[in-house]
Image (tube, grey):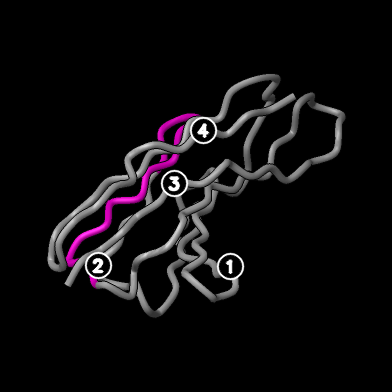
Amino acid sequence: QVQLVESGGGLVQAGGSLRLSCAASGRIFSINVMAWYRQGPGKQRELVATITNGDLTNYADSVKGRFTISRERNTVYLQMNSLKPEDTAVYYCNADVKSRSLYPTYNYWGQGTQVTVSS
């Protein structure tokens, strides 16, 4: 089994910064794509950023230039700068994990961490 555990959420004023972390543990052979999603109050879950095992990144237009996704082995980070009240959401970590070399890839979610940006 694989677990994703997020940390780093909290309350911050507009214009401030936060850094989220997500550590994957358990039976892991390889992880291809790791990603951050978020779900704001009354909104659908949306993709924030992705990073491949080759460090190729992709961002939602709403966070480009403000957020940076990075990765170190089985941990993914999200550096969030110039935060806005509309960034308030529960942020979820997501990963495509292969537990053994000949096994298929499965998708896993973390439990989420709350980010609140006050105006």
Q: Are marks 4 and 3 in contact (CB under 8 Å)?
A: no
- As for residue 74 lying within the magenta part, the answer is yes
Q: Mark 4 highlights which residue? A: 5
Secondary structure under badge 2?
loop
Residue in view at x 48 percent, y 70 percent? 41
Q: Mark 1 highlights which residue? A: 45
Residue type at numbered disc 4: Val
Q: Mark 2 highlights which residue? A: 66
Residue in view at x 51 percent, y 33 percent? 5
Secondary structure under badge 1?
loop
From the top left corner, tell me how far across and down residue 69 is, in percent: 37, 53
| Disc nearer the start of the sequence (4/1) | 4
Task: Tell which tag, 2 or 3, sits nearer the viewer.
Answer: 3
Residue type at numbered disc 3: Thr
| Disc nearer the start of the sequence (4/3) | 4
Q: CA distance from mark 2 to mark 4?
A: 23 Å
- As for residue 6 lying within the magenta part, the answer is no
Secondary structure under badge 3?
strand
Badge 1 density bin: few <14, some 14–19, many ≥20, Cα 10 Å: some
| Disc nearer the start of the sequence (2/4) | 4
Q: Nearer the viewer, residue 37 or 66?
A: 37
Q: Is residue 79 above or below residue 48?
A: above
What residue span does the magenta drawing correspond to?
71-84
Q: Nearer the viewer, residue 84 or 98?
A: 84
Q: Mark 3 highlights which residue? A: 113
Q: Nearer the viewer, residue 117 or 31?
A: 117
Q: Is residue 98 above or below residue 29?
A: below
Figure quadrant of residue 88:
bottom left
